[in-house]
Image (cartoon, rainbow, N blue to C red):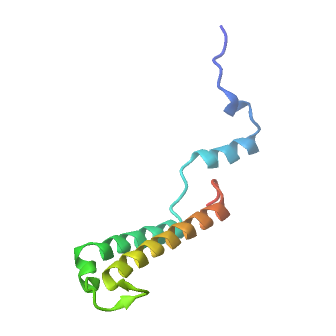
C-alpha cells in the first residue's frame, strides 16, 4: 500500500516550516490596530447625534465653510491619517512579524 501524500509542507526543512507557520497563523492585535479602532470609533461618534450637536452651527466660517461642514471635513482627514498610519505600521512589521 502506498503512503498518503502529505503535501509540500512536510517536505520542507524545519526552519522553512516555522516561517510558513508564522505566516499562516493570524497576526496578533498590535497597538497600532487598537489605536486605529479607537480613533475610528471616536470619529464615528463625532459624526452622529451626540458628537455632532456641538458642531452643528453655521455661524463661524472656517476656510469659507460653515462649522458643521468643516467638522465633517476634519473627521474625514483624521480618519485618512489614521488609516495611513496603520498602513505604514503594518508595512514596517511585515505579515508574519509580531
Q: Where 75 falls versus 94 (above or below)?
A: below
Residue 28 placement, left or right of 44: right
Residue 67 in percent (x, y) is at 33, 85
Residue 90 placement, left or right of 17: left
Q: Residue at x 45, y 71 (%)?
A: 79
Task: In the displayed orientation, state which residue is furthest to the front.
Answer: 64
Q: Residue at x 34, y 78 (%)?
A: 69
Q: Identify which residue, 80 or 2, lies in the foreground.
A: 80
Q: Residue at x 63, y 48 (%)?
A: 23
Q: Where 52 falls versus 94 (above or below)?
A: below
Residue 63 placement, left or right of 93: left
Q: Residue at x 36, y 89 (%)?
A: 61
Residue 30 in percent (x, y) is at 53, 65
Residue 52 placement: quadrant: bottom left
Task: In the displayed orientation, state which residue is furthest to the top.
Answer: 1
Q: Identify which residue, 90 or 83, lies in the foreground.
A: 83
Residue 45 in percent (x, y) is at 30, 73
Residue 54 placement: quadrant: bottom left
Q: Identify which residue, 5 or 27, lies in the foreground.
A: 27
Task: In the displayed orientation, state which residue is furthest to the bottom.
Answer: 60
Residue 13 in percent (x, y) is at 77, 38
Amino acid at each position: 500500500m502506498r503512503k498518503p501524500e502529505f503535501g509540500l509542507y512536510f517536505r520542507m526543512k524545519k526552519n522553512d516550516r516555522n516561517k510558513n507557520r508564522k505566516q499562516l497563523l493570524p497576526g496578533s492585535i498590535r497597538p497600532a490596530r487598537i489605536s486605529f479602532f479607537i480613533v475610528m470609533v471616536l470619529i464615528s461618534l463625532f459624526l452622529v447625534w451626540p458628537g455632532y450637536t456641538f458642531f452643528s452651527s453655521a455661524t463661524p466660517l472656517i476656510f469659507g465653510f460653515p462649522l458643521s461642514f468643516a467638522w465633517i471635513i476634519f473627521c474625514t482627514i483624521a480618519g485618512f491619517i489614521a488609516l495611513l498610519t496603520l498602513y505604514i505600521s503594518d508595512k514596517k512589521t511585515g505579515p508574519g512579524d509580531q
